[in-house]
């Protein structure tokens, strides 16, 4: 399970795959491989545009505004979220409104503080109290993402890739994030 999670497979898919047997595990890994391939295509395009910017700078001294805009668009595409996922996140924000979004953020900060209290108490991630916090964390993430596992996977990859403090704008610390991942690895009963 931990190996699949480290590959970026969402926890819910891991659980379904493990319940369904080897064929479902293979399907989950193949789906993740497809996402990685898509990401590589976007990264190659970004690399091509960055090379073009460097050549333009060497030849002319400054890249054109069009070259800069194209490169910025490619950088967005190569980030953790697909354009469709970004559209869906914006839609979720509009659906909830500013007040609803602020409530999600506040609830996330409360849960992060609760996780920190488990860390401070030296509580094992398998402890029922820690597992209950993990259940509530997962429920909040499900509400925030509209149940979109791809978005959730991209969120978690962003947190891992950028670092928790940067990716969450200070809501989640590295210590909290590591503990949350450990509670997920233990797996909480349904």
Image (cartoon, rainbow, N blue to C red):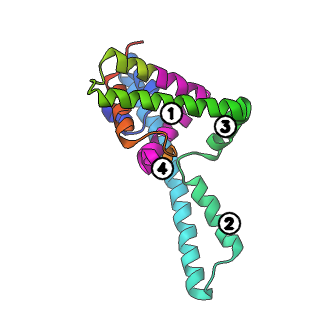
Q: Earlier in the sequence, mark 4 or mark 1?
A: 1
* Gap between marks 4 and 3 measured at Cα: 22 Å
- As for residue 153 lying within the magenta part, the answer is yes
Query: Outermost residue toward the top?
Result: 190
Q: Which residue is mark 3?
A: 88
- As for residue 86 lying within the magenta part, the answer is no
Magenta-drawn segment: 136-165
* Gap between marks 2 and 3 measured at Cα: 23 Å
Q: Mark on residue 69? A: 2
* Gap between marks 2 and 4 measured at Cα: 24 Å
Residue that appears at 45% across and 39% down? 172
Q: Is residue 67 above or below residue 62?
A: above
Indicate which label's residue lies in the foreground, 1 or 3: 1
Residue that appears at 28% across and 24% down? 123
Q: Which residue is mark 4?
A: 166
* Gap between marks 1 and 3 measured at Cα: 23 Å
Indicate which label's residue lies in the foreground, 2 or 4: 4
């Amino acid at each position: 399970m931990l190996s699949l999670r480290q590959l970026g497979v969402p926890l819910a898919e891991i659980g379904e795959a493990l319940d369904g047997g080897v064929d479902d595990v293979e399907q989950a890994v193949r789906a993740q491989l497809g996402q990685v391939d898509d990401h590589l295509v976007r990264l190659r395009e970004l690399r091509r545009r960055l090379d073009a910017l460097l050549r333009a700078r060497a030849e002319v001294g400054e890249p054109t505004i069009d070259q800069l805009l194209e490169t910025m668009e490619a950088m967005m595409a190569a980030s953790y979220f697909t354009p469709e996922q970004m559209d869906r996140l914006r839609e979720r924000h509009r659906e909830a409104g500013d007040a609803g979004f602020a409530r999600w953020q506040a609830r996330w900060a409360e849960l992060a503080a609760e996780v920190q209290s488990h860390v401070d108490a030296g509580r094992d991630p398998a402890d029922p109290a820690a597992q209950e916090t993990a259940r509530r964390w997962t429920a909040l993430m499900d509400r925030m993402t509209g149940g979109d596992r791809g978005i959730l996977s991209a969120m978690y990859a962003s947190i891992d890739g950028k670092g928790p403090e940067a990716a969450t704008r200070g809501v989640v610390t590295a210590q909290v994030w590591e503990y949350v991942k450990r509670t997920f690895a233990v797996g909480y009963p349904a």
